[in-house]
Amino acid sequence: MFDFFPSYPKIKRRTWLMLLSSSISLVVHGQKSEALLKQFERLSGSSPQKAMQMVDSLAAIEGIHDLPGEWLELMRAEALFAMNEYPRAKLNFLTAGELAKQNNNLKVLARSQVGMAQCSYRLSDVKNAIIEAEQGLRYAKEAEDISSEAKALTLTGNVLMNQKDFAGALSYFNKALEIHAARGDSSQMAANLNNIGNVHLESKEYKEAEAYFNKTLAIDSALGGRSYVAGDYNNLGLVMKNRGDLETALKYQMASLEINRELHLPFGVAGNFNNLGNIYQGLGKPDEALRMFNDCLELADSLGYQSIKNDAMSNMADVYMEMGEYERANQYLKDLVSSISQIYSDDVAKKLTSFNDLYDLMQKENEIRDLQQREALNQVRVERERLWYLAILLMVIMMGLVVVWWMRTRSLKEGHRLQLDLQHYQLKAIQLQMNPHFLFNTLGAIGNYIEEHNAGEASRYLSKFSKLMRNFLEAAEHSVTTIEREMTLLTRYLELEQLRSDHSFEFEVTADESLYGTALPSMVLQPIVENSVLHGVRKLTDEKGVIRVHFFKEDEETVCEVSDNGPGFAPKQESKGKHSSIGMQLIQKRLQLLSKESGQSLQLKVKDRKEGVRGASILIYLGSGEFKSR
């Protein structure tokens, strides 16, 4: 339906002659590469397609200008990035970096590395974006390239904003803004003002966000960067939508869409469609909203923009539910769950591969370290054999003792660090087992519910599950959470189980106020609560089930008690203090490893019950709340 990647037309003979004449004129007047680069930067902001045509022309008339091959590859990559073609841009940044290494061109190397980081971030590959940004920052400092250094700082701020660390993000954006202001780089100043506006938008500080976006719009308009102006209109539209001024929001989004279509920027067009759908939905125009969401879905699917595609499916399901068309809403929610599950599985595979690669790397580093130690000892032995005089011999022996002591101390420290790292990766491996365990159990519950209930109830059930999964996937990225987030996750899980069992049980999730904000390991409590549902209240036939989850303080230690009025543990299970389910076994293993890593006593105990009293109660000791996310 949409073709936003037209092949670049062949340049006619007259155009070739004009470009050739222009390039020769630049050389004659002594402007050469510096003037060509400035001309390219102006075109990148106003018309990325013309910037690409300029690069193709320069490549065809090699010898007329003095731009090396790595500069041409870098310019091609930056033009592709401005056109939102991030996979192709990353390949060209990689090629430019390799050529720069061969020619020892540190400036191009720094810009290429930072460009790769920006592409990874736009493609939602946050892990590689961080690694590439750190490498780019090192190259930029070595090359004294202040512009690339500021871009690396900006990208780090974007990563922190993505992780909801707004204070940290503002710190990096302000550092980058200071650098660009000192250099008088208006284009990059606008980019950082836009980033600061986005931080305020995410923090729901709409007045401050609007002020920063208007500053950005003024600079971009003056510079003629139409693609950036489209982004500014889009941001102002989001601000107005959140402030409730939907008519003004509609005008801004339509203005942004017009520019993005004119410049053939598919990523921006897809975002405009999605935002326009939300605005029409708020204006009570469901047909217009569905048309926009459908256009967004088709475009995002054809280009592989998975996150925008998922948002569009979720929004379409919401509209159909509001219209009472539960079967169609149910179909979109099923597609959304399938898409999220696939992303999750791919992410698990990547993490497992990363774990294996890191383990192999540690093994190789140990072998290299052993060889280096043997070589050092051999050098000391050779030096001893060559010494003839007693005074020199004594000096060498003393130096040898100092070296051995130093190497021994370093070896002990390194061994301790490797042991901690190994424990950390063991924890990660266990968490990667736990996450699919929860996911597949919940998907199985949804399948059963759909078979047993009507389409409307199943759609509402899937909607709740979709919101739970969105929070769960965010929590799975971190090894540490807070009590408030854990309470929210447990509440939503129990609501789903309560719906599935036709409200055959009640539940209560509470915490002492003094514990709010306290850190604790993520994904520890859910399998225990699931155990209370499946092996506790589900087996009751004579009374209604009750599950209670309560966080409290005991001797400076955070404790969570999970209790139910089910049949309780068998005597054999109670004496062992654990349940035989896979989820409970994984929790026991994870608590043991966390105890070793943090130096705290994390354990699970079965609370004694009075004779004749039915039910089960489990105490989970979660330490003092001092955990670091790795």
Image (cartoon, grey):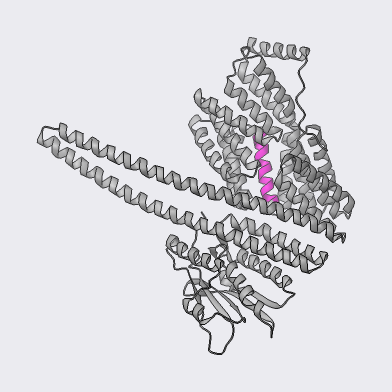
Give the residue at x 28% y 40%: 374
Give the residue at x 60% y 31%: 93
Give the residue at x 68% y 11%: 25
Task: Say which of 611 and 207 sits in front.
Answer: 611
Q: Where does residue 295 sit, x and y in percent of width and height?
A: 82, 44
- Tell whether position 24 is magenta: no
Task: Say which of 184 and 248 sits in front.
Answer: 248
Residue 305 seen:
yes
Q: Where does residue 149 sit, x and y in percent of width and height?
A: 55, 36
Q: Residue furthest top?
A: 28
Above or below for 27 versus 618:
above
Q: Which residues are magenta?
A: 187-201
Q: Residue furthest left?
A: 390
- Please indicate whether residue 281 sits to the left or right of residue 598 in the image: right
Q: Where does residue 5 sit, x and y in percent of width and height?
A: 76, 32
Q: Residue furthest bottom?
A: 612
Give the residue at x 21% y 40%: 399
Q: Quadrant of the N terminus?
A: top right
Above or below for 79 versus 439:
above
Residue 174 seen:
no
Q: Quadrant of residue 451?
A: bottom right
Q: Where does residue 185 sit, x and y in percent of width and height?
A: 63, 32
Above or below for 17 versus 362:
above
- Please indicate whether residue 574 sits to the left or right of residue 446 in the image: left
- Tell whether position 199 is magenta: yes
**What type of secondary structure mainly makes up the magenta span?**
helix
Task: Say which of 143 and 551 sits in front.
Answer: 551
